[in-house]
Image (cartoon, helix red, strand yellow):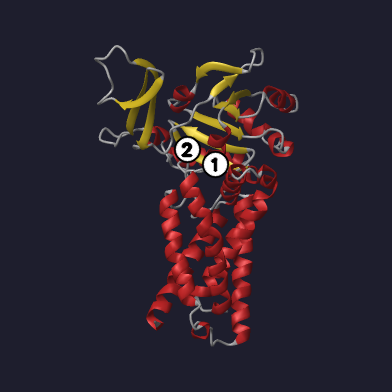
């Protein structure tokens, strides 16, 4: 039992520490996932607190894991682990059964699990959490009390500073498919031998007022007394999905009915052998204007050097016109999906530098470069 408890403590410690760490790396992504959950549960008003829950969850997970790993107040940490598992195990069962979201977000974008994999993972962790609380005095630390509090205090300080930094700048580790150095066309390609979607087709025919379900193997093709009513095709197993599969960018037309042109400029953008600057804002209603205005010199510099500039957003025409009227530089607006833009960059607004379809650099609005910094990156590329 002693060995089993050691294994349980270390395993739970590693899982909780890792889970809290990767959530802290990408708090915006964790907040988005909370929003998805709240919408699926019919509680959209809680979405306003998604960021708070993202901070709280990642911090508590990290501290519980850290305390278990280093046997600091391990009995209290064991109760914390059990509380987590008693909450999340039934929640992940509901998610597995109802499938309201495709990925639980347990490990951010670092590790993707199916909903059923997540549930069974939680069952194992729940068992280990219960094991830790059998004769809980065996788990308690014998360390000096002051040392324990110093170490726990250091862990609290670390995770708080780490969360703050990643929220106010871009994540220090980018687990998403649009990380710096990515050649976007490569992430959009489906390999020749990639598994395809597995589907089944149901045909519905009526005879004598009774509708019956058939498959492609047994439908009454040779009996004209059956009348076709409907056909449904269901995906029973999804095939390979490239990491980037939903990227489309359309020019915004001020004079058109809905503002969206019919031409997807993505191929043109990815084929550009020069540099392109994408200024991205998924929500212009909440975008701070000061960082945009601070880009004036850089945008003018880009135009002088014939670098193309794009302002890509998912906002409506009214919001675009409001921001457009306040910009001190000239730039064309383009439209893309909000989720895609949030995936490209965790900043509103954010800046992305592209060349030949490759992401050269990305900036949070708190770190927008001046001309000197920008030239240094360009010169580095020429080496």
Looking at the rendered structure, which numbered label has been put on residue 362? 1
Closest to the observer, 192 or 174: 192
Image: 111 above or below 258: below
Image quarter where the N terminus lies is bottom left
Residue 99: % across, % down: 48, 44
Mark 2 sits on what residue? 359
> Which residue: 53% across, 40% down?
343
Residue 282: % across, % down: 62, 34
Closest to the observer, 208 or 35: 208
Residue 175 visible, this angle: no
Closest to the observer, 264 or 360: 264
Q: In screen coordinates, is 289 left or right of 65?
A: right
Residue 369: % across, % down: 61, 41
- Is the Cβ of the residue at disc 1 closer than 8 Å to that at disc 2? yes
Query: Tag 2, which secondary structure?
Result: strand
Image: 370 above or below 18: above
């Amino acid at each position: 039992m002693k060995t089993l408890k050691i294994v349980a403590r270390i395993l739970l410690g590693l899982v909780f520490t890792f889970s809290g760490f990767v959530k802290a790396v990408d708090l915006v992504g964790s907040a988005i996932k909370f929003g998805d959950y709240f919408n699926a549960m019919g509680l959209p008003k809680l979405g306003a607190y998604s960021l708070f829950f993202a901070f709280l969850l990642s911090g508590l997970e990290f501290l519980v894991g850290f305390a278990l790993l280093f046997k600091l107040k391990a009995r209290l940490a064991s109760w914390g682990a059990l509380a987590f598992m008693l909450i999340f195990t039934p929640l992940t069962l509901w998610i597995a059964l109802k499938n309201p979201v495709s990925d639980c977000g347990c490990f951010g974008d670092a590790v993707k699990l199916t909903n059923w994999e997540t549930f069974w993972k939680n069952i194992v962790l729940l068992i280990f959490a219960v094991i830790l609380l059998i004769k809980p005095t065996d788990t308690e630390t014998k360390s000096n009390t002051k040392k324990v509090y110093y170490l726990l205090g250091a862990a609290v300080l670390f995770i708080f500073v780490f969360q703050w930094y990643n929220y106010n700048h871009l994540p220090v580790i980018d687990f998403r498919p649009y990380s710096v150095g990515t050649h976007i066309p490569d992430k959009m390609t489906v390999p020749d031998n990639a598994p395809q979607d597995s589907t089944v087709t149901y045909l519905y025919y009526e005879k004598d007022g009774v509708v019956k379900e058939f498959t492609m193997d047994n439908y009454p093709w040779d009996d004209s007394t059956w009348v076709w009513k409907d056909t449904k095709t269901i995906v029973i197993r999804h095939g390979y999905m490239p990491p980037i599969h939903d990227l489309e960018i359309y020019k915004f037309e001020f004079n058109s009915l809905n503002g969206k042109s019919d031409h997807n400029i993505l191929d043109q953008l990815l084929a550009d052998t020069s540099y392109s600057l994408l200024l991205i804002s998924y929500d212009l209603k909440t975008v701070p204007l000061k960082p945009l205005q601070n880009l004036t010199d850089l945008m003018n510099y880009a135009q002088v050097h014939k670098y193309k500039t794009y302002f890509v957003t998912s906002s409506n025409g009214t919001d675009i016109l409001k921001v457009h009227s306040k910009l001190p530089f000239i730039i064309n607006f383009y439209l893309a999906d909000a989720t895609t833009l949030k995936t490209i960059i965790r900043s509103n607004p954010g800046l992305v530098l592209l060349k030949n379809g490759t992401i050269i650099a990305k900036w949070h609005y708190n770190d927008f470069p001046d001309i000197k910094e920008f030239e240094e990156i360009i010169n580095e590329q020429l080496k």
